[in-house]
Amino acid sequence: MRLLDVNSADLRLVEFSDAESVEYSILSHTWGEGEVLFADIQSGNFKDKAGYLKIKYTCNQAREHGIPYAWVDTCCIDKSSSAELSEAINSMYSWYQAARVCYVYLADVPFGDANSGFPKSKWFTRGWTLQELIAPRDANFYSKEWTNFGTKVELVDILSVLTGIDTGILLGQVGMETQSIARRMSWASKRTTTRVEDMAYCLMGLFGVNMPMLYGEGKRSFIRLQEEIMKTSDDMSLFAWRRKDPPLGLESGLLTDSPRDFQHTGDVFPYRNLSLEPYSATNRGISITLGFPDRPYNDIYIAALDCPNPKTYERCVGICLKRLGSRDQQFTRVRLDHLVMDAPHGTPQTVYVRQGGPLPGPSDVYHQHWIALREGPVKWEGQRGFHVHSILYGPAASLPFHATSLLSNWNVTAPYRGWIPKGLKREYSIFKNVNTLAVVICFKHTDGAAISVMLGSGSDAGVTADATLCISGDLQYFVSQFNPKRLSNSRVSIVLGNHTVTVDAQRHVLPGNILVFVVDIKIRPHDDSDAHPIKSKRKFLGLR
């Protein structure tokens, strides 16, 4: 640490390896034109610079207080050295904390204009001055003319109103660890920095983290800050943010790119749930356990954070998530302007929430795509009904299926009621090409009616279905007739004459990166009366 010798007329700099071994004062201010830099001290050309006056004020005040040294960020750091700059920024909170006193210089507030000028000072809007307000154990506030407005203790009430920070935090009577991450972020939500990256770097001390400086990374620095916070904290209020007026359709991960999104969520705090699995950043996104509802609403899940409603202490704070295409357990955050304050606790589910970056195309994710037929129409001996007449499929669908045992182990093939005749396959490979027919299951009724159900590939590694009142023709005929219908919420229903064909497909990813759609097919008369086969038959035959 490099300090100014306040008893030296020429601003002599002295280096100390251990800052705790020396007593010093420290200056908090906002930068302006003509600042005195380290190089200026080295060359001796600094007395004509505008920034010299506040350094002179600082040294004079330190001498009056009997403090031998002073630290001023403009001239005590050699910013031409990236290593020194990084060390200083990572140490700055502790340096302000260790100082005997902090002198806060409000260069834009004349002493005679204290009542109206004090609250409007630029000092209250800057990112770096947040830690300079909180960290020092003692602070004195000075006007433009270096007239004392009062100490932090004397001004604590107005400082609390202006900054939204509790008086106990400002006076060091309450530990920083008692404040939720969302609350600490909210303190910085209205502040700005000249460089984008500094909005993250100036907050490291408030969260007790360190990280290297990478000027040029832009808003990525704030993402890195949150990733560092995650390593030492399980406080889910980190994810309790909302963005004002985001672009329509914008998606995000759990982390935001600015503290401004915490402006209205500072009252959110976490439960202390030690039973939850720890969350962490992975190459698939943040792996985290959240409370999920039984089903989505319009493809959106309200996922409950481990944070109660801060007003009622009932239910949870929730965020809106959407599944990334058809990928298992991969989600993205949507409706970024929305934070649900009464989300049910839901069922704990561990998912991955992707922070950003391109995803591979869905069809490239899985080595193989398959359809496995599970449940279908059954015609028992002596009864009337539909039975499988034939199954048509192309060369790709005839590939050998090696995951039958895996399906059995995963318990996804039951119930199978023996509706496919012996000698015919139950599993068929799907082309990765979109809307390509894979297999045709032709059903015939004991009364002569015929229905063919066609299954094929869909967009986003999905499955599609169609049906027709015909069982004659080869595969090419059905290819020409295939009008693929995407399954909505894993189901599609198709009306054909007096019957409705319903296709359900459950999606499973098996070891070996094999994507399998387990398909159930139901064919029912319009009155849906399985319990009255005679009535169903008469209606089908047109009899009353």
Image (cartoon, rainbow, N blue to C red):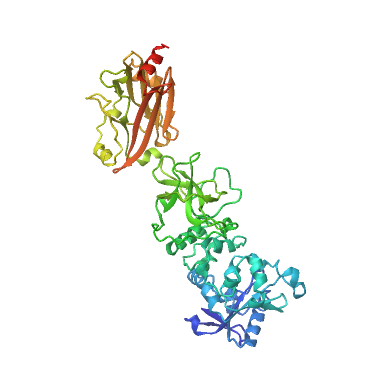
Farthest residue, direction right = 112
Which of 96/329 is in front?
Answer: 329
Identify the residue at image location x=35%, y=19%.
533
Query: Residue 440: where, in percent of width, then height?
Result: 33, 23
Identify the residue at image location x=53%, y=50%.
342
In the drawing, does residue 284 fall left or right of residue 197? left
Query: Residue 40: where, in percent of width, then height?
Result: 60, 76
**Image quadrant where residue 446 sits:** top left
Q: Is residue 157 at all visible to an observer of this figure? A: yes
Q: Which quarter shows the C terminus?
A: top left
Asked if 328 appears above or below 161 in the picture, the reply is above
Which of 224/482 is in front?
Answer: 482
Which of 95/327 is in front?
Answer: 327
Query: Residue 224: where, in percent of width, then height?
Result: 47, 59
In the drawing, does residue 395 fall left or right of residue 490? left
Which of 331/434 is in front?
Answer: 331
Query: Residue 397: where, in percent of width, then height?
Result: 30, 29
Q: Is residue 132 at all visible to an observer of this figure? A: no
Farthest residue, direction left = 423
Identify the residue at image location x=47%, y=81%.
18
Q: How many marks?
A: 0
**Image quadrant where residue 62 sits:** bottom right
Asked if 34 appears above or below 365 in the picture, the reply is below
In the drawing, does residue 118 fall left or right of residue 412? right
**Image quadrant where residue 419 sits:** top left
Asked if 512 appears above or below 105 in the picture, the reply is above
